[in-house]
Amino acid sequence: MSFELPTLPYDFAALEPHIDTQTMEIHHDKHHAGYVANLNKALEGHDDLLSLSVDVLLSSLDKVPTESRQTVINNAGGHANHTLFWQIMTPGGSALPEGKLSEALTSTFGSLESFKEQFTAKSVSLFGSGWVFLCISNGSLELKRHSFQNSPYMDGKTPILGLDVWEHAYYLKYQNRRAEYINAWWNIVNWTKVDELFASTQS
Ligand code: MN
């Protein structure tokens, strides 16, 4: 019983030119694989915890022994965050959000454009390594910035869109130009998947 690295839903080269092939290979096969391996190692002998889904594990950290809790936060968070990240991107991007998600984005942030501006501003200005998420919190949309691999599930929130702003996510192609990476990333967001994740929180 153990956590497993999910297969990418597209080829390493599929997100070019916005995210380069080599970054995708290293990011998925080394970084994400590393989080999964370290999580399994940290929970060795704890079959009850290894049998949980990663979101449930992250929302029940009190069950994790104190001495391994921070390792589990880092690596279960890394596993959950990257699993979401691969899913909410798609080659060439998708149609824009529609229906209930579109309405919720407009009522919460003013418009889709304004949401993207606020999300981008939070991403550009994040100090050091971390993520920016669109979450569902008590039924409402919320923009959240997290350091390191801290996951919204730890706070009882469900992420439906997330952007990795660790340097390993963009440095090979963009070096210090984080804003350029973020602007390129909007071209490959899979709104269809975000819509689906949003719908699954609304029942
Ligand atoms: Mn990453």
Image (cartoon, grey):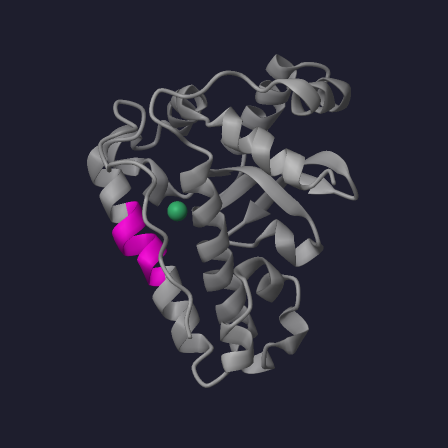
Measuring from the top left, give residue 99's x and y in whole percent: 67, 19
Q: Is residue 77 above or below residue 61?
A: above
Which quarter of the figure is the N terminus placed in? bottom left
Q: Is residue 98 left or right of residue 181?
A: right
> What residue sits 63% from the left and 21% below the top?
115
From the viewer's side, name the closer residue of 155 and 200: 200
Q: Is residue 15 left or right of residue 44?
A: left
Q: Is residue 124 above or below residue 167?
A: above
Which quarter of the figure is the C terminus placed in? top right
Residue 88 can be seen in this image: yes
Measuring from the top left, give residue 149's x and y in whole percent: 50, 54
Measuring from the top left, give residue 184's x and y in whole percent: 38, 21
Characterize the magenta stretch by its predominant secondary structure.
Answer: helix
Q: Is residue 33 magenta?
A: yes
> What residue sits 61% from the left and 62% below the top?
56
Total labels: the figure holds 0
Measuring from the top left, give residue 54's x and y in whole percent: 53, 61
Residue 165 can be seen in this image: no
Q: Is residue 151 left or right of residue 163?
A: right
Q: Is residue 149 magenta?
A: no
**In which image quadrant can residue 199 be found?**
top right
Specify the segment rendered in magenta. Answer: 27-34
Q: Is residue 8 above or below residue 181?
A: below
**In which image quadrant can residue 156 be found?**
bottom right
User: Given the current orientation, which residue lies at the most extreme front position?
Assistant: 203
> What residue sits 62% from the left and 18% below the top?
98
> What residue sits 63% from the left and 50% below the top?
152
